[in-house]
């Protein structure tokens, strides 16, 4: 019975697990696939045949003749289209009479086969038509009926031709190593900042005091609040012209000019005679990242701290351990 219930539980969890895997792995595999494809915005759609038609001449009486001109082009300037062509249906009372090579007519329907066309192909096909009394009584512009095109072309996103061109462009770029270094800084310091801030917040709330529940709820605000709202708040606070932080710094005479926290790449700072470039914008973004995600680590660390028996702290206090020693040798290893 227990084994049957276990299998049932796994079966009920299987759809959820499959959805999570698809949501996570789908975009990841798609990015890996696209990374080996030298695609641009113009390559997002496969090459197709574009046809624009117009009526040349007037059909005022039965028996009048005119021409329907089809301007054909390949949407891609590089990719060829195999077996290209189009099919168009003439309005009632309009009969195709003069057909060029490659075009056939079946009643009111005209089919033109162009064959294989190269990238950047442009040409025109002219079909002669004759009007009868039915068309004169109810004239309809042939352009009202959109021609149906056909043909097959390779899509660079779905074919099995792969290239290392993207990787070559990335590794040969002059900005590659700088971008890679910034990515490492952002990941390492953002994660470390969130963990350290969460650790100290958990240590603060690990003791009993009035209002601890309210303060714990406030600590969760950065993580549960919409990211657009908190990001806008930071932008307003750090605005170089009307931001609160810049106003405080200027009133305290700490700066002479406002600091553009999000737009200034770096500023020179001298410490003990050593001058180095301090990354202002990157540090601001890292600080926001740490503040945004420290509640997540705070919750897990606080839960683990509260599971530690108070007898261990009491025994350490009797042995003469300072609060810092209790934190270092009891709380932190947990």
Image (cartoon, grey):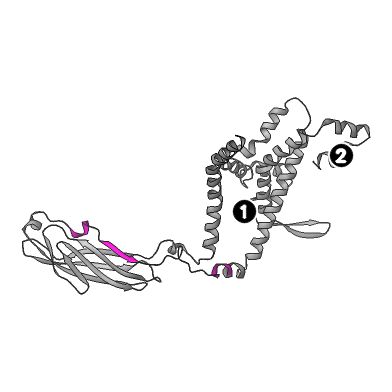
Q: Residue at x 58, y 36 (%)?
A: 5
Residue 263: mark in rendering: 1
Regarding residue 255, the answer to whether it shows in the image is: no
| Magenta region, residue range | 139-167
Rendering quarter of residue 49: bottom left
Camera-nearest label, 1 or 2: 2
221 shown above or below 148: above
| Crowding at mark 1 (Cα within 10 Å: few <14, some 14-19, many 20+) | few
**Sequence-earlier tag: 1 or 2:** 1
The spot of residue 13 in percent (x, y) is 56, 41
Report the predominant secondary structure element of the magenta stretch.
loop
The spot of residue 264 in percent (x, y) is 64, 55
Regarding residue 113, the answer to whether it shows in the image is: yes
Which quarter shows the C terminus? Answer: top right
Residue 197 versus residue 283: which sits nearer the camera?
A: 197
Q: Residue at label 2? A: 324
The spot of residue 296 in percent (x, y) is 67, 40
Q: Secondary structure at mark 1?
A: loop
Rendering quarter of residue 100: bottom left
Q: Residue at x 58, y 70 (%)?
A: 168
Outermost residue toward the right?
A: 319
Q: Secondary structure at mark 2?
A: helix
Residue 156 horizontal side relative to residue 107, left or right: right
Which quarter shows the N terminus? Answer: top right
Q: Is residue 145 magenta?
A: yes
The spot of residue 155 in percent (x, y) is 42, 65
């Amino acid at each position: 019975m227990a084994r049957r219930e276990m299998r049932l539980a796994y079966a009920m969890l299987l759809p959820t697990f499959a959805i999570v895997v698809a949501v996570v792995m789908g975009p990841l595999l798609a990015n890996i696939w696209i990374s080996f494809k030298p695609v641009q915005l113009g390559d997002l759609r496969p090459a197709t045949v574009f046809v624009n038609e117009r009526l040349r001449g007037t059909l005022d009486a039965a028996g009048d003749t005119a021409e329907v001109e089809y301007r054909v082009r390949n949407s891609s300037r590089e990719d060829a289209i195999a077996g290209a062509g189009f099919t168009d249906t003439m309005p009632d009372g309009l009969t195709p009479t003069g057909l060029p090579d490659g075009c056939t007519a079946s009643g009111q329907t005209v089919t033109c086969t162009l064959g294989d066309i190269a990238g950047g192909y442009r040409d025109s096909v002219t079909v002669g038509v004759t009007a009868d009394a039915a068309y004169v009584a109810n004239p309809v512009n042939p352009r009202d009926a959109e021609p149906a095109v056909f043909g097959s072309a390779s899509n660079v996103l779905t074919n099995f031709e792969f290239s290392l061109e993207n990787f070559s462009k990335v590794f040969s770029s002059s900005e590659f190593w700088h971008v890679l270094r910034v990515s490492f800084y952002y990941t390492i310091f953002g994660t470390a900042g969130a963990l350290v801030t969460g650790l100290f917040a958990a240590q603060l709330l690990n003791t009993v005091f009035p209002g601890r529940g309210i303060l714990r709820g406030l600590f969760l605000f950065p993580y549960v609040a919409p990211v657009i709202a908190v990001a806008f708040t930071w932008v307003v606070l750090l605005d170089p012209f009307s931001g609160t932080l810049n106003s405080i710094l200027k009133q305290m005479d700490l700066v002479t000019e406002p600091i553009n926290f999000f737009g200034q790449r770096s500023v020179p700072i001298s410490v003990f005679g050593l001058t180095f470039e301090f990354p202002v914008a990157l540090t601001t973004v890292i600080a926001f990242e740490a503040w945004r995600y420290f509640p997540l680590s705070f919750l897990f660390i606080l839960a683990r701290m509260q599971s530690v028996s108070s007898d261990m702290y009491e025994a350490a206090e009797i042995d003469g351990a300072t609060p810092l020693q209790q934190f270092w040798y009891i709380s932190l290893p947990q």
